[in-house]
Image: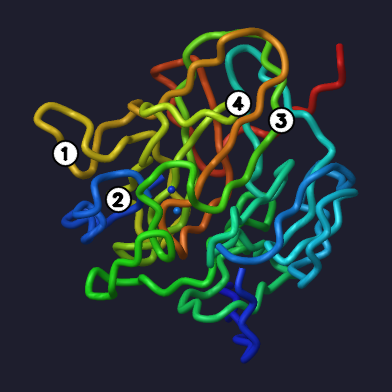
Amino acid sequence: MVQQRMKSPAVVLAAVVVCAAAACGDESDNGGATTSAGASTSGSGGAAGGVSSTGGATTSSSTGGGGAAGAGGSASSAVYHEVGGLVAVEAEHFDTNDDLGTPRAWHLSSTTVDPAVTPDPDEIHADSASGSAYMEGLPDTRVTDSDPIQEGVSIYNNVGTGPTLSYRVYFDDPGTYYVWVRAYSTGTEDNGIHAGIDATWPATGERVQFCSGKNQWTWSSAQRDSGSPPSSCGVPNTITLDVPTAGEHVIAFSMREDGFEFDKWIMTTDAGYVPSGEGPPEVEYTGN
C-alpha cells in the first residue's frame, strides 16, 4: 500500500544521482556533483536498532542529546561495525544531521511520520523502505528538467555544501571500499547525493548516479560521467572511499538534489558485490 502524503500549509524550511535511463536532466549543465533549511541535529541519544526510534520532524533546533530537530529524525548513539569488508547502515540512523544553513534539510519519512514539508509532490514510500523509514531532502522544488536550476538551493554541485548526514563506523579493515546507496526516484531531477569520509569529500565519492529502477527502491554505485567514453549514467563500482586506518571513522552523505529519497547505504571491499532487496542488516560495534 502506498501512503498518501498529507500536505500541510505550514512550510518547514529547513547527492547518488538518480536519472531516467534515457535522460539525466539539466543538472549536467552545472558541472557535476549535486544536494535543506531547518535546524541541525547532532549528539547521541536515540536508539539505533531496527526501525528508526525517532520522534518525528519538529521545529526544535536542539543540537545535543538526540532530540528530534527541524531537519527531522533523532541522532543515534550507535557506532556501526564493518565486518569482513562489509558495513550497512539505515539512512535514518545518522549521528548528525546538519543543513549547513541552506534552504533545504534532510527530513524523516516513515510509516508513522510525515514531514509535512511543502512543496513535495511525491507520496511517502516508507512501506517498501528498509526499516520502514528513510530520509528525504526537502522542500522539493526541482522535479523536472523544465524547473529552474537554483545552485545552492535545489541543487548542490559543490560537494559537501548541501545538507549533510553523518554516521560513525568502526572499521576492522582499512582499504578501498565501494559505496552503494539505496534510493527512490520518481523523476529526472530528484536523484543526487555525494559521499565523504572524515570531513573530506574525495572526487571518487561525488555524484552517485541512478539510470534505471525508477519508481522503486534501487541500489547504485555508479558515478555520473564515469566510463570510457564518459557516460552520464556512469558505470557500477565507480563510487569509492578510502579508509586509511582501522578504527572509528565518520562516513557522510551530502545532498546533491532536493527531493532525493535516501534509504540505506553500504560500503564493501568486494568489487563483485551487488546488493539486492533491502541489503544486509546493520551491525553495531560493541567494542569486542
Comparing labels 4 and 2, the label whose residue is closer to the camera:
4
Q: CA distance from mark 1 to mark 3?
A: 33 Å
Q: Quadrant of residue 129?
A: bottom right
Density class for disc 4 (Cα within 10 Å; few <14, some 14-19, many ≥20) is some
| Residue beneath the point at 84% across and 38% down | 77
Q: Earlier in the sequence, mark 1 or mark 3?
A: 3
Residue where numbered disc 3 is placed = 168
Q: Which quadrant does the N terminus fall into? A: bottom right
Density class for disc 3 (Cα within 10 Å; few <14, some 14-19, many ≥20) is many
Q: Position of residue 17 (x, y in %)?
A: 36, 49
Secondary element at tag 3: strand
The answer to whether residue 193 is above or below residue 215 is above
Q: Is residue 66 left or right of residue 157?
A: right
**Contact, CB < 8 Å: mark 3 with mark 2?**
no
Disc number placed over residue 263 in the picture, else none:
none
Disc number placed over residue 198 in the picture, else none:
4
Q: CA distance from mark 4 to mark 1?
A: 29 Å
Q: Is residue 31 left or right of residue 54?
A: left
Q: Earlier in the sequence, mark 4 or mark 2?
A: 4
Q: CA distance from mark 3 to mark 4?
A: 10 Å
Amino acid type of the residue tagged 1 in the rendering: Ser
Disc number placed over residue 212 in the picture, else none:
2
| Residue beneath the point at 77% across and 47% down | 42
Residue where numbered disc 1 is placed = 231
Amino acid type of the residue tagged 4 in the rendering: Asp
Q: Earlier in the sequence, mark 3 or mark 2?
A: 3
| Residue beneath the point at 60% across and 73% down | 13
Secondary element at tag 4: loop
